[in-house]
Amino acid sequence: MFQQRLLWVTSLLLGGMALLIGRLIWLQVIRGQTYVDLSQKEFLPPGHCTETVRGRILDCRGKELACDQPTFNICLHYKLTRLYDPRYISVRLAERQKPKKRQQTRRELNRQREQADELLENLARLCNIPLEEIYNQIKQINDTLFLMQAVQARKRHYQSLDIPYPQEPNALAIWADFVEQVPNPKERLQRIFQRESAVWEMDQPQMIIPNVSEDVALTVEDRLIGAWIGAGRGQRWISITTGKKRQYPYDDIACHILGQVRKVPQFLVNLTDSGADPSLEELQGYRRGDRVGEWGVEFLFENRLKGQRGWIRYGPDRQVVKQIDGILGQDVTLTLDIELQRRIQQCLCGDNPQQPRYLGAAVVMDIPTGHIRALASVPTFDLNTYYQKENWEFLNLAGRDPLKRKLNRAIYKNYPPGSTIKPTLLLGALEGGFISRFSHYECLAQREGILPGSFCFQRGHGLVDAHDSIKRSCNYFYIDVGRHMRAANVIAYLKNAGFNQKALAWPEGIDPNQRYGSFHETPGVLISNPSPTQLKYICVGLGPINSSVVQIANSMATIARDGDFMHPTLIQNPKAPVTRRPISNSPQNILFVQQAMRSVIYDMDGTAVNAFKPLSWPKEQVALYGKTGSTNMECLFSGYAICRDGRALALAVVIEDPDGTGGAVAAPIAKRIFDVCGQLGYLPAPQIPNPQTRISQ
C-alpha cells in the first residue's frame, strides 16, 4: 500500500517537473526571442519626432517673401496650470474624506497657488504682456487637456461595460455622450481626473507665450527658470522651448497674396510624442502647436510647404534603433516681382502726381507668358503683426475696419469695367461682321440714352467712326454696336474674351475649393439675357457687368497678343499649364483695334494724351496703347506697352474715386507704373523722366 502511494506521488512530481521543463523550454527556447524583444522594448528610450522646416515663398527673382525663423517659446507645466482649474481643485478636495485632511490639502493648494501667482506676475512683467492674457491662455490649456482626459475616461467607461466604443464626429458630441453615460457631475469629474485617464500631453510643456526674442528668453531663464513644482524635483513649472515663427520680410507688401499661417486646429492633430512608433501617414500630419496655412499661397500650397517630420528611436546604448528621415517643405515661387509690387503700392498710397492715398488695385502682366508681375491691392496690412490681438480684431471683426484692408481688390472685388471694355467689344463687332472699320455714328448732345452726366449727353462727339470711338471714348457709338450685335452675341463674345469666368491658371492638382479658400477669386458678373436697357449699359461697361482688375488687364494682354487668349498665373513653380485660344481670326481687325488704342495716348484728342506727357520713350522704341474709363465710383485705365526688342507688359489700374476720371486720375498712375517697369528692366529705362513725377527708389 505504501509503495503504491509512493509511486503516485513520484508520478505527480515527475509530471509536474515535466510540465515545468516544457514551459521553461517554451519560454526560453521556442518563444524566447519574442519575450526578449518585448522586455528590451520596455527599456528602450521613447522615440520622438524630428522637426522639419516649412518651405519658403519666393518672388520671380528669388527673393524670400515668407520663411521660417528660429524663435523661443515660454511654456508652463500642467501641474501649474491646473491650479487655476476649479474642476481639478474640487476633485482634489473631494478625495479627502476627513475634514482635517481636506483642510491640509486646501492649505497646500493655496500655497502652491500663491507661488504660481507670483511667478506669473513676474513672467507678465518680464515679457511685457497683460497678466490677463496669460490667464486666458491657461484656461485654454486646462480646457483642452480636460477634454482629452474626458475622452480617455469615456473610453474606459465603455471598456468597463464591455460594449463597443461609439465614434462621435466632434468634441461636443463626445462630451454630450459622456454626460449621458455618466450623468452625476461629481462622479464624472472623478473619472476624468483619475490617474488612468491621464494623457501624455499633461507631462509636455504647454506653450503660453510664443515667439519671444532671445533677450526675453535669456531674462526669463536667468530670473524664473528653476521654480519647481511643489516640494518635488521632477519637473519645473516654467520652461523655454525652441520653435519657429513665420517671417514676412516685406511686411505688408503682397500681403493679400502671401496669406498667413495659424495654429493647427485640434481636429487636424493626429501626431503625438507618446513614444509609440508613428505611421508615415501620421508623420505627414500635424501635432499640437503646429502651424497651417490660413489663406493665400500659404493655404493653397499647404501640402507642398509644410514638409514632413521624421522619427528617431535610440537603444539603451544611444545607438539608433529606428529612423525615418524627415522631408523639408518645398519652396513655392511666384511670378510676382516684389520690388515692382512695392513700388506700385507706394504709388497708390500717395507717391503719385495727385498725392492722395487711394483705395484700389493695379495689375501688371507679362504679355508673352501671362505671368503676373504685380498684383497690388490697397490699403494693406502688416503680415508680421497680423495676429496681435488688436490688429486681428480690427481686420476681422465686422465693422471694425471701414476701409476693408483685408479685401483683395485685384482678385476678389467686382468693378464695372467702364469704357475699358470697348476695345474688346469693338473687336467682337468687327469679327462678327456686325460693323466695319468704316462704320460711323452721329453722337449728338441730349440724345436719349444713358449717363446724362457723360460727355456724349452734355456735348456730343459729332460724327464718330470706329477708330474715334476708342480714342474719344464715345458711349453712344457702343450702344449702337450693341444694337447691331444683339444681346446674345455681345454676351457670348465677352465670355469668350474672359469675362464672367475666373481668370487665373493654377498648377495641376489644386482643388477648386482650395483656390476659392485661398483667394476668393471672383468670376465677375455678366447676365445672360439682358433687356435692351441693360444691354446699353453692358456695352459701355456698366450696370449688369462687373469684373476683376485681373480680368481687365488680361483683356488688354489678349489684344496685345493679336487676339490669343490665355489664363494668367501667379505661380512660377510649380508650373501651371499654359493653353491658348484665339478670340480673333482677322489680323486686320486686331491691328485696327490696336491702332485705335494707340491713338488714346498719342493723338491730340486722345483721352489719355495729357496724362502721358511728356512721353517716357520715343514711340519707335516703346509703343504704348491704352483705354481710359470712368464710372460713378471708379477711375480706370488699362493698356499695354510693346518694346522694339520684344518685351511687352499689360496693365490695369482701378482707383475708387467718385469725383475723378480715368484720364485725370488712373492714367497718370498707369504712366508712373510703366516708368517703374522701365526702371526695373521690364521695359527700357525711361529716357525722358519727368522731375515732377519722380518715382521713389
Image (cartoon, grey):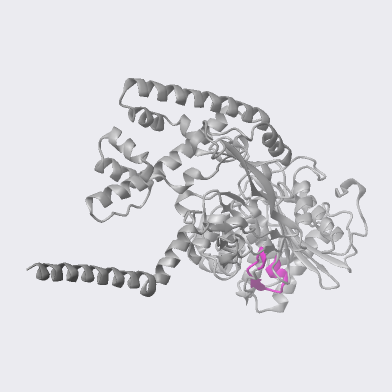
Residue 377 visible, this angle:
no
- From the image, which quarter does the N terminus lie in? bottom left
Residue 163 locus on image (x, y percent): 23, 54
Image position of 535 (left or right of 466): left
- Nearest to the observer: residue 314 or residue 520: 314
Q: Quadrant of residue 3?
A: bottom left
Residue 627 locus on image (x, y percent): 73, 59
- Nearest to the observer: residue 460 or residue 103: 103
Residue 51 locus on image (x, y percent): 61, 57
Residue 160 visible, this angle:
yes
Image position of 618 (left or right of 119): right
The number of numbered discs placed on residues in the rendered structure image is 0
Q: Which residues are magenta?
A: 557-573
- Nearest to the observer: residue 318 or residue 137: 318
Q: Is residue 451 magenta?
A: no
Q: Which residue is at a point 65% across and 56% down the rendered structure image?
A: 549
Residue 602 locus on image (x, y percent): 84, 61
Image position of 283 (left or right of 28): right
Q: Quadrant of residue 628?
A: bottom right
Q: Is residue 559 magenta?
A: yes
- Nearest to the observer: residue 247 or residue 544: 247
Vertical comparison of 545 with 319: above or below: above
